[in-house]
Amino acid sequence: MPLTVELITAERVVRVEQGVDVLIVPGAEGQLAIYPKHAALMTTLEPGEMIIRRAGQEEAFVVTGGFLEVRNDHVTILADASEAAEEIDIARAEEARRRAEERIRRYREQADRDVDLARAQAALQRALLRLRVAEQRRRRTTGRPQV
């Protein structure tokens, strides 16, 4: 019996998929693959790429952390934030990366001590993750890197 996967954030239900053959998620201790008939499990998720494979097709998602529960071939993911790879606005992610790098630079040069360094570093990590997942999706679908 295939998996049913629910990907949920505080803002929305991102995706509900039935008939999933395997779910690959960024677990707290590395990549975790969930197959049908998986043992019951609860774990935390790290920021990273989540992949849903069904009938030979793959869908990639960005998750920025959260929790995962597996029970009776039903997987529930409560993500801090998530979006499908095809929804990623690359120009917006590049701009977020640039802004975060600029805030970090200003902080390090002591030009702006009002910068929240941890927040700027987290924003940079999110932007780089979104760009990496979008690039990997592009490579999988076109076979060549983005220019």
Image (cartoon, grey):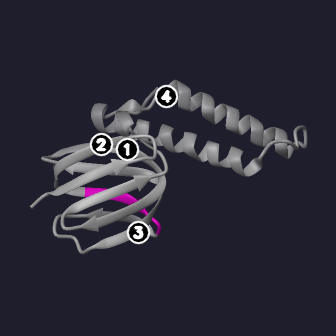
Q: CA distance from mark 4 to mark 3?
A: 30 Å
The amino acid type, in three-letter code, at marker 3 is Thr
Q: Which residue is mark 3?
A: 43
Magenta includes 24?
Answer: yes
Q: Are marks 2 and 4 in contact (CB under 8 Å)?
A: no
Mark 2 / mark 4, whichever is N-terminal: 2
Name the residue nearer the viewer: 98 or 81.
81
Q: Quadrant of residue 74?
A: bottom left
Say whether marks 1 and 2 touch (CB < 8 Å): yes
Q: Position of residue 68 (x, y in %)?
A: 37, 62
User: Of helix, strand and loop, which one carries label 1?
Assistant: strand
Between the C-alphas of marks 4 and 1, the distance is 14 Å
Report the span colored magenta: 23-28
Please state which of the two labelled residues, at mark 2 or mark 4, is closer to the viewer: 2
Q: Nearer the viewer, mark 1 or mark 2?
A: 2
Q: Which residue is mark 2?
A: 15
Which mark lies nearer to you, 4 or 1? 1
Q: Amino acid at mark 2?
A: Arg
Q: Which residue is mark 4?
A: 90
Query: In the rendered structure, which amino acid carries the disc numbered 1?
Result: Phe
Q: Amino acid at mark 4?
A: Ile
Residue at 76% over, 38% down: 103
Chain-order first, disc 1 or disc 3: 3
Q: Which dot, 4 or 3, sits closer to the camera? A: 3
Q: Nearer the viewer, residue 16 or 92?
A: 16
The quadrant in which the N terminus is found is bottom left
Q: Main secondary structure of the magenta part?
A: strand
Residue 61 got which mark? 1
